Image (cartoon, rainbow, N blue to C red):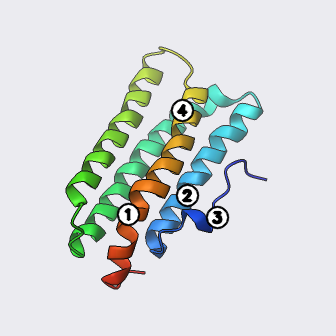
Amino acid sequence: MPQYAWNDKYSVGIQTIDSQHANLFCILNELSDAMKCGQGKAVVGPLLKELLQYTRVHFAEEEKMMARVGYPDLANHRLAHTALTQKVADFVVRFESGEMALSIELLDFLNGWLGNHILGTDKKYSPHMKEKGLQ
């Protein structure tokens, strides 16, 4: 059973975005499972690169949808995305430089990000986007 389970409380009511958010839970669970098996270091590098690429794609899609419906707080949401993407990019640099094994720190970051960003920041745009016909 996954430690971090997607459920309806994380839904923003936009199918594409919910699907992408659910995939982020899969990435988080992959890291958690690897750590439990003592393989955290073996998967952190590839996982970080996958996460960085995935967040860039997801955020671009989300921002495109918000722009299409004229979401009034898009600029602030974009700033949050930039900060989150930079944080993941920093994890990649730190890992590749051999600074430290980041699996626990990364897991904590991802867990906090999923909770805070999706349940807080992303939930704010949901009513506007649904009102404009996105589902």
Q: Earlier in the sequence, mark 1 or mark 2?
A: 2
User: Closer to the observer: label 4 or label 3?
Assistant: 3
Residue at which label 2 appears: 23
Residue 69, percent from left and from top = 24, 76
Q: What residue do we see at 48% from left, 15% from top?
A: 98
Inter-mark Cα distance, 4 to 3 = 22 Å
Quadrant in which the C terminus appears: bottom left
User: Closer to the observer: label 2 or label 4?
Assistant: 4
Q: Amino acid at mark 2?
A: Asn
Inter-mark Cα distance, 1 to 4 = 25 Å
Q: Residue furthest top?
A: 99
Q: What residue do we see at 48% from left, 44% from top?
A: 113
Residue at which label 4 appears: 106
Position of 105 with respect to 128 (left or right) is: right
Residue 84, percent from left and from top = 37, 41
Q: Earlier in the sequence, mark 3 or mark 2?
A: 3
Q: Is residue 16 above or below residue 60?
A: below
Q: Amino acid at mark 4?
A: Leu
Q: What residue do we see at 30% from left, 70% from top?
A: 65
Q: Residues within 10 Å of mark 1 (few under 14, many from 20)?
A: some
Residue at which label 1 appears: 124
Q: Amino acid at mark 3?
A: Asn
Q: Residue furthest bottom?
A: 133
- Where disc 3 sits, the SS reads loop
Q: What residue do we see at 40% from left, 50% from top?
A: 55
Inter-mark Cα distance, 2 to 4 = 16 Å
Inter-mark Cα distance, 3 to 2 = 12 Å
Residue at which label 3 appears: 7
Q: Residues within 10 Å of mark 3 (few under 14, many from 20)?
A: few
